[in-house]
Image (cartoon, rainbow, N blue to C red):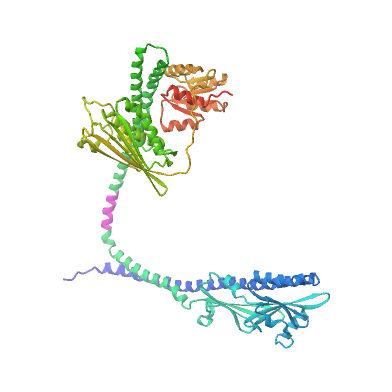
Amino acid sequence: MSIKIPKKEIIYPFSVFVLLMIVVIALWKNSLDSNRELLKKDIEVNGNIQSQGFLSSGQKSIIVLENLMERLEMTNGDYFEYWEEDARLILKEDQSFKFVEWIDSSLVIKRIVPNKGNEAVVGRTLSNHPRRDEWLRHVRDTTTNLTSWIPLIQGGSSILLDVPVFFEGKFQGTITAGMDFTNTFDKLSAGMDNYAIEIKDDKGTTFYSLNDPSPSDFSDDLVYVRSYEVDQDDKQVWTFYLMPRNKDVLAERNKSSSSILIFGILISLLMSLLTYFYQTSRNENTRFRDLNIKLRVANRSLREERTKAEKASKAKTEFVSNMSHEIRTPLNAIMGFIEVLKESKIDSSLHEYLSLMDVSSKKLLLLVNDILEIDKIESGQISFKKDIFSPSEELQNIISIYKPSIEAKGLYANLDVVSDSKTHVIADIGKFDQILTNLLRNALKFTEKGGIDITYEETILNSDLNISIGIRDTGIGIPKSKLKTIFDRFTQIDSGITKRHEGSGLGLYITYLLIELLEGHIEVDSTESVGTEFKISLTFPITEMQPETNAPISNSIDLTGFKVLIVDDNKINVMVLKKTLDAFGINTYWVGNGKEAVTAVAENQYDLVFMDIHMPEMDGFEATEEIRKTQKDLIIIGFSADVTKETIQGAKEVGMNDYYTKPITFDKLRQNLSKYLVRV
């Protein structure tokens, strides 16, 4: 059974095919004509450029010889003693010259440079030479003579160039040079691999050719011909020819046009088929339009959900930041009063309570810092500094800090270092310390007897340092069922109301995230009641630079007598900071907002200003900007519980010299102030 195709559906596609083929053939023929015209244009342009270059090169050689003639004439022959030195210099600088000789007025060749290989011509006379008459004619006309390509007595062929020399009122002789332009013209023809060149003298003798020229292989319009007169007296003409190197060059260029023709035929067939299926595709297009509308609706919903998610993320970040600020502010007061009480004379029985309060407040601060660290990592706002340090030395420093706590618990701490090259690397030393500190604290927390073994190994690979660190304890171990979840946040080994060990379950989660961001690796192996071992591997780029060494600031530096203005609306925090500064002997003054600070600074002279950020009426940023309009050198230090990156960066941008976060210890505050409060 045959399928009958409607006549209408055949005629329209066939008409499209015929119309497109007419256009394709017209374009193809036009392409062939264009290829020939382009080739002719290329030949004309290159021929004009090359012929002009060859002519200029020949003229330059004539000028060089005429300059030597002028030096002889201007010195009345005195320069003749330097004649041979000039000739050697000419031969060295212009490879077109093969020799330079002196023919005196009696037509005898007296000297020649170089002499070697040309001995046969010295002493020869031109009296019986075929070019005698030509030579004498140019002497009489005092013009430069250029011969055809002629054979030489000493062998080979050359174009001879005669320059007559007159001084003391009479003809003295000619400076004659043998010219072979092959090397010079080859340099001018560099890059002309697709062309052939031929130059003939007035006798029709070819004295230069490139790439085996064959003008007879081409039609006249594909051969560039230029004739130019090189000797006006003798009407001597050189003829320059430039043509394609390959006689099939036009056919090769037309290959692309043939490809276009084939491509055009295929396109015509394709368009015909597309036209044939047009009616069928209309229904599909309608269906696709409906689907596209539904897709746009879905995309709009996705964008709305994304906006909601971004707002929720921003709200979460702001909430964490605000909660951190609200917690750190009273925490600053608590820790500050603890510091004040520890420095005061109180009953010795209360010191134990103070120590417990100190430990508890610091644990609370660590918890707040961990939450902030997680928020920075998860929101993509964390940044890594480029410090210079030795990983092996830094590991030893951290162990030395925790060793007293380890030994106080009756435990041992052993460090086994392999390949301790003390190589320095570029990395964030704070993040490196945080990883090691979290793992050491974790081992110390869950170990009641025995101790902690730390291993360190480093290897150098190309320009990187690969380090492997193992921390193995003899603690309670981790159940197999919990090994896969220990790096989850808020996950603890012993949870519930019966748990024995303190902690928020954030340390290992932060450690895992930091190692992942540093493109490192961490793994854990544990057995209950035997112990746990964490193994980490990190790679850092090696540097030859050395870390900066800052001499420690002595705590005994005298700060008495300095005037410091405290700008803070929280009276408790003011009281804590004031008590601390009073203990240093510093005279302190206080205002409750930024507007009052601007007035106080204008009316009084202070050595330093502690500026809170969040205050009523005028915040710390605005106040700093106002003060900086008149006080460029006043030390202004931001002092706030806001530890967000944006706030710290903003403090530097408005002109604050530094930024301290609350809470801060007595010792750290004294050392930091010592950098700014210096007696002159």
Residue 220 vs residue 431: left or right?
right
The structure residue drawn at horizontal position 32% and vertical position 27%, both measured from the top left corner, is: 407
Q: Quadrant of residue 331?
A: top left
Q: Going 64% across and 71% down the picture, which residue do you hit?
A: 56
Q: Left or right? Give the position of 84 relative to 349.
A: right
Residue 72 position in % (x across, y down): 77, 71
Residue 501 x, y percent position in the rendering: 26, 26
208 to 357, vertically: above or below: below
Q: Residue furthest left?
A: 1
Which residue extends farthest right? 169
Q: Can you say whether 274 is above or below 84 in the image?
A: above
Question: Could you say which quadrant of the image residue 388 lies in?
Answer: top left
Q: Nearer the viewer, residue 246 or 622?
A: 246
Q: Does residue 612 appear in this view?
A: no
Residue 470 in the magenta stretch? The answer is no
**Near-viewer residue (389 or 98):** 389
What span is in magenta?
282-292
Placement of the N terminus among the 4 image quadrants: bottom left
- The answer to whether 427 is drawn above or below residue 146 in the figure is above
Which quadrant is home to the C terminus?
top right
Residue in the foreground of this view, choosing between 669 and 274: 669
Q: Report the magenta stretch's main SS.
A: helix
Left or right of 196? Residue 307 is: left
In x, y percent, where is residue 639?
45, 25
Q: Residue 397: which quarter of the image?
A: top left
Q: Where 464 falls versus 513 (above or below)?
A: below
Most extreme residue toward the top is 347
